[in-house]
Image (cartoon, helix red, strand yellow):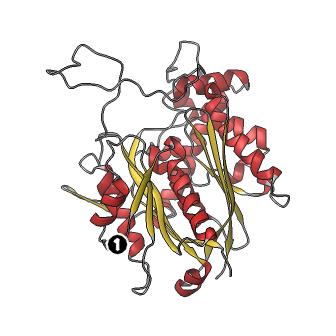
Amino acid sequence: MNRDAVVVGAVRTPFARLDGELASVDAQALAAAVIRALTERLPASVGVDDVLMANATGPGGNLARRAALDAGCDVTVPGITLDRQCSGGLDAVTMACRLVQAGAGEVYIAGGTESATTSPLRAEDSPDVGARGRGFFPRRAFSGGGWEDPGMAESAEIIAWERAITRERQDSYAAASHAGAVAAADDGRLAREIVGVATGAGTVAHDSCLRRTLTADRLARMRPVTRPDGTVTAGNASQIADGAAAVLVVSRRVAELIGGDGLVHRDSTAVGVEPRLCGLGAIAAVDRLTERNVAFDPAATHVAMVEAFASQMCATIDALGLDSARVNVGGGAIALGHPWGASGAAQVVRLFYTLQVGDDGLALAAVAGGMGVAAWFSRCAQ
């Protein structure tokens, strides 16, 4: 029996800036929007085996199950919510692929969702903690065992220093991300990915984080965020955003029933690295993927990577010898926004609409706490 796992549908919501156009829509409703859009692409005779959704900051309660019911899935469809921070959505996709390959089921909806705007606040202790105050959570810890646990921007700064990635190079990368996203928005490429989300003010159907006038010169004027002599700024880092993304993963049999091109899951892996260098996690993941797949060449693939910081992107391109012209075509999270739990799945969505038949694609994420995830897909005709 053929046990290929094939991605046959992929969607995301618009990505909206923090406290922006999607501020009134919580993570559950964002997830329901993409789940509903994917179920509508299934023939009436095909049911969903499970819904896997990632979420990084929500309050719990198995969001995936709740969102599946909100989306109109049959009550017999279960749901599971997972969290590996920035890679969570990608992990949901690869887990769905593995379930199909194992013969556990034939139809899975997998992705991630995040509403940073409506999630519980996290900050350092403040005087208003207590019965009369709002009650802040402390900053989440990503590391244990005595390992150093810097913040994400601090880690990006360490990488820039240790890998000799200049401020100018980071700003140049960020400017290119914005230029690529603007071009993709203007020629309609991004619209293919997006399903609109209804709000009290109407339907939101476009990304709102894009800054069309942001050039390298403008970026050079921004102040460093961690220390006066630093290189990481708000301009060469990703923007916090609200949004969701998901894909439809099916068996080869169901893929042939639906018809059309799809992405075949070739292999995927997750690895750990030193937490202080968490932004380098994708490098280690690709190295492991390469070790066990002789035919795999990362330099010849199209790459969609969670673009948290320009420094980690430049370090990854250098270490893996990637073709920068094939990395984050159409812009990444620096330009489009970073809805943490959804961002990993958004990389698979991007590959779904970027790869041509015969192309290989690589979805990557470097993860807080010192981890990396890599997933290899190939575009094939049914």
Quarter where residue 368 is shown: top right
Residue 149 visible? The answer is yes
Does residue 37 appear left or right of residue 296 in this picture?
left
Residue 44's spot in the image, x, y percent? 39, 86
Q: Quadrant of the N terminus?
A: bottom right
Is 240 or 75 nearer to us in this picture?
Answer: 75
In the rendered view, tell whether residue 48 sits above or below residue 321. below
Identify which amino acid the numbered label 1 is placed on. Answer: Thr
In the rendered view, tell whether residue 103 sits above or below residue 17. below
Residue 55's spot in the image, x, y percent? 42, 47
Is 169 or 21 nearer to us in this picture?
Answer: 21
**What residue is disc 1 on?**
76
Q: Residue at 67% x, 55% y: name it.
A: 268
Residue 208 visible? The answer is no
Residue 2's spot in the image, x, y percent? 68, 79
In the rendered view, tell whether residue 41 sits above or below residue 158. below
Residue 40's spot in the image, x, y percent? 38, 77
Q: Residue at 67% x, 51% y: name it.
A: 269
Does residue 226 appear left or right of residue 355 in this picture?
left
Q: Residue at 34% x, 64% y: name it.
A: 68
